[in-house]
Image (spheres, grey):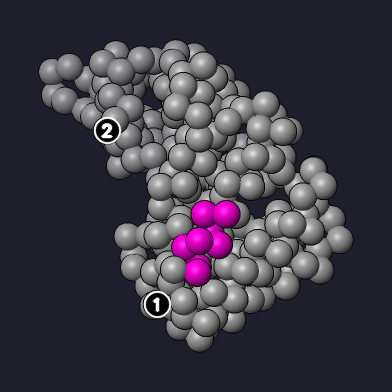
Amino acid sequence: MFKTTGSLRRNVHSQVADRIGLSIMRGEIVPGDALPSEMRICEMLDVSRTVVREAIRMLTGKGLVESRAKSGTRVRLPEEWNHLDPDVLRWQLQTTNVDSYLIKLFQLRNAVEPAATAIAASTSTAEDRARLRAAYEGMATARTNEAFVAADIAFHKGIYFATRNEFFWPIAQMFEITLSPSLTIAATGDHRPRSLVEHRDVVEAIERRDPEAARAAAVLLLEHSAADLVRIRGIDPFGEATVRSAE
């Protein structure tokens, strides 16, 4: 329990939250179970009670645990976790089955991104459109897969920001963590020329302020991205039974 996860990050209570959060994600402490006592965690990790209490407050704020006077601190159900929290996303990415993770991410994008792209075509500011154009140009001029993926992430984040709807923005923020594995896998294929055309079609439709064209361009881009995963990884993100078989 509370395994070391490599180099220490940020402050001490964040390190402790990392250890406990990863233990929860790995199923070492299951929903409904109590965490070890504060004193026991202090002994296990060689930290003070102040540090442990701050780590527990962090985990409580992320929805992973709840503390009650008579029953201690217990792990909450996954349905109650804040799955858009950057740390929760990072812990999930470190512990989950990669194929299952990619499938779920694609299902989210398929449900939301075409609509967000259509909204962006209507609501985006000149600054939003310039940001999207710059991200596309970054993809077009990238000389390495890493640079291509970074620009691709910036492009998709830009779509959600361009909705001018703050309820879409957390999805954009999560892409910094979640989208990189998917795009990195796809970037190893020979699809880049086609992908550039599809991203260009998206940005041009948004620049023309044409919601239906923007939606259609986003749908096509996602369909072809899913096909790349089928070809490269052998998984179908849009297959009904795929999530169950990948878990």
> SS of the residue at dot 1?
helix
**Residue range (magenta):** 213-220
Residue in the image at 57% along x and 23% along y: 97
Which is more toward the observer, 71 or 242? 242
User: Could you tell me residue 149's position as x and y percent?
Assistant: 71, 54
- Give the mark, 2 or 1, whose residue is nearer the N terminus: 2
Give the quadrant of residue 82.
top left
Disc 2 marks a residue whose amino acid type is Glu
The residue that label 1 is drawn on is 122
Disc 1 marks a residue whose amino acid type is Ser
On the question of residue 240 being in view, the answer is: yes
Residue in the image at 59% along x and 81% along y: 130
Report the disc number at residue 163: none
Which is more toward the observer, 151 or 245? 245
The residue that label 2 is drawn on is 80
User: Could you tell me residue 164's position as x and y percent?
Assistant: 37, 73
Whether residue 215 appears in magenta in the rendering, the answer is: yes
